[in-house]
Image (cartoon, rainbow, N blue to C red):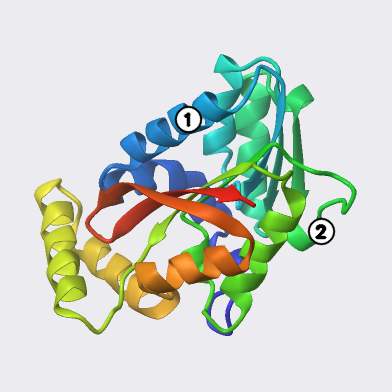
């Protein structure tokens, strides 16, 4: 995704296999974020809908949403073969493969004739630099959505050269340590954030969303440096 970050190398088989356990320990409010996203989408979609999951990873969003909505179909796209392997195993075990299409690639690899009723892009875009890559991802999602369709977005965010960033990063570090995460693993995670995460301010994020064709943007979640937004395509 960047010159330094390769999803195929970063999310290799071993890391993909332990991703679901790790992410729940490391990210504050992870379960709450996904539950809130679910209820927001439920409120806006009918009984039958086709959802795009951009950066579907191991299939977390699909596994959460599909059992409650038998009329919903899902297309998940992710550049990591190892993560998609985990997703296929997970969704097959839940009997969800018939309603799910998984694509190894990016939103640019989607069928240009398909229009989705909603999209989710959770904890993905922060890996992309703000050199046109973030804008291209959002533009691709917007292009794939029907008018009026919602996008649920979540990422690490904030201007990384501010006192707010330093304060929240320090608090997040202490939070991880207080939850029993090995200090060595916490340090590895902080190095990963410094190396691979491309922070932008919320003001910049709103501008990127508006430029991509999302006219309404609402902030619905915050946990230290992690934020969640609901955006509506024009």
Q: Residue at x 28, y 45 (%)?
A: 25
Crowding at dot 2, Cα within 10 Å, few <14 / some 14-19 / many 20+, comes out as few
Q: Position of residue 78 (x, y in %)?
A: 66, 54
Q: Position of residue 116 (x, y in %)?
A: 74, 40
Q: Are marks 1 and 2 in contact (CB under 8 Å)?
A: no
Q: Is residue 226 left or right of residue 186?
A: right
Which secondary structure lies at badge 1? Answer: helix
Q: Nearer the viewer, residue 14 or 125?
A: 125
Instruction: Name which quarter of the figure residue 197 lies in.
Output: bottom left
Q: Residue at x 58, y 17 (%)?
A: 67
Residue 179 seen in render: yes
Q: Is residue 161 left or right of residue 107?
A: left
Which secondary structure lies at badge 2? Answer: helix
Q: Position of residue 178 (x, y in %)?
A: 9, 50
Examine the rendered structure and indicate whether residue 131 appears above or below residue 101. Answer: below
Q: Earlier in the sequence, mark 1 or mark 2?
A: 1
Residue 106 seen in render: no
Q: Residue at x 64, y 41 (%)?
A: 149
Instruction: Name which quarter of the figure residue 85 lies in.
Output: top right
Q: Nearer the viewer, residue 196 or 154?
A: 154
Closer to the eye: label 1 or 2: 1
Q: What residue is pinned by disc 2?
A: 109
Examine the rendered structure and indicate whether residue 193 appears above or below residue 177. Answer: below
Q: Which mark is residue 92?
A: none
Q: What residue is pinned by disc 1?
A: 38
Examine the rendered structure and indicate whether residue 99 appears above or below residue 209. Answer: above
Quadrant containing the N terminus in the rendered view? bottom right
Distance from disc 1 to disc 2, alpha carbons, whole Å, reads 25 Å
Q: Residue at x 10, y 59 (%)?
A: 174
Q: Is residue 197 left or right of residue 98?
A: left
Instruction: Name which quarter of the figure residue 196 lies in.
Output: bottom left
């Amino acid at each position: 995704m960047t010159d330094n970050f390769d999803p195929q190398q970063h999310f290799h088989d071993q890391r993909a296999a332990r991703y679901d356990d790790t992410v729940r320990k490391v990210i504050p409010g992870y379960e709450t974020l996904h539950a809130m996203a679910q209820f927001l989408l439920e409120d806006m979609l009918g009984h039958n809908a086709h959802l795009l999951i951009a950066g579907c990873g191991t299939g977390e969003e699909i596994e959460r949403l599909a059992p409650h909505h038998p009329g919903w179909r899902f297309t998940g796209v992710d550049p990591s073969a190892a993560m998609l392997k985990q997703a296929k195993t997970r969704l097959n075990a839940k009997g969800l493969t018939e309603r799910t299409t998984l694509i190894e690639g990016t939103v640019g690899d989607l069928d240009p004739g398909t229009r989705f009723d909603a999209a989710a892009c959770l904890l993905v875009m922060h890996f992309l630099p703000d050199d046109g890559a973030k804008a291209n991802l959002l533009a691709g999602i917007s292009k794939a959505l029907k008018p009026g369709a919602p996008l649920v977005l979540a990422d690490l965010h904030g201007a990384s050269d501010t006192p707010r960033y330093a304060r929240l990063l320090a608090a997040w570090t202490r939070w991880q340590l207080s939850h029993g995460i090995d200090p060595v693993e916490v340090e590895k995670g902080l190095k990963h954030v410094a190396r691979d995460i491309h922070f932008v301010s919320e003001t910049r994020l709103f501008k990127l969303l508006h430029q991509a064709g999302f006219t309404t943007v609402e902030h619905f979640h915050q946990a230290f440096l992690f934020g969640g937004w609901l955006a509506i395509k024009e």
